[in-house]
Amino acid sequence: MQSPMERAALLTFSEVQALVKMGRTWIYAEIKAGRFPAPIRLSYRASRWNAGQIYDYLTALSEEGMRE
């Protein structure tokens, strides 16, 4: 379980990629399909992902895998 501070953290693309262990193309395709959390746009060149949303996504994915 993550603390509230960990869940509120903003993650870089590299950090998200390391957590989900998937490539750039897969991540952006999943965002476009609505199956992966979209980034928060901080500026024209800076995006970050909410850590809590990524952890929730990973939890749901693991729970789905356990049901199969």
Image: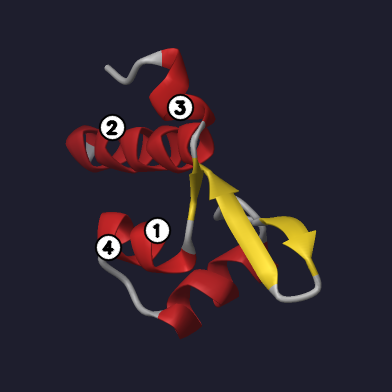
The type of residue carrying mark 2 is Glu
* C-beta proximity under 8 Å, tags 4 and 1: yes
Q: Which residue is mark 3?
A: 7
Vertical placement of residue 65 versus 52, above or below: below
Percent from the top left, x then y, of residue 15? 36, 59
**Badge 3: few (under 14), some or many (20 or more) residues near its Cα, within 10 Å?**
some
The type of residue carrying mark 3 is Arg
Give the mark nearest the N terminus, 2 or 1: 1
- In three-dimensional space, the C-alpha distance between marks 3 and 2, rounded to whole angstroms, equals 19 Å
Q: Mark 3: which secondary structure?
A: helix
Percent from the top left, x then y, of residue 4? 45, 15
Q: Which residue is mark 1?
A: 16
- In three-dimensional space, the C-alpha distance between marks 2 and 1, rounded to whole angstroms, equals 19 Å
Percent from the top left, x then y, of residue 10? 53, 44
Q: Which residue is mark 2?
A: 63
- In three-dimensional space, the C-alpha distance between marks 4 and 1, rounded to whole angstroms, equals 5 Å
The type of residue carrying mark 1 is Val
Of the two numbered discs 3 and 2 in the rendering, the one whose residue sits closer to the viewer: 3
Q: Which residue is mark 4?
A: 18
**Badge 1: few (under 14), some or many (20 or more) residues near its Cα, within 10 Å?**
many
The dot on residue 65 is none
Q: Mark 2: which secondary structure?
A: helix
| Coloring scheme used | secondary structure
Vertical placement of residue 27 versus 12, above or below: below
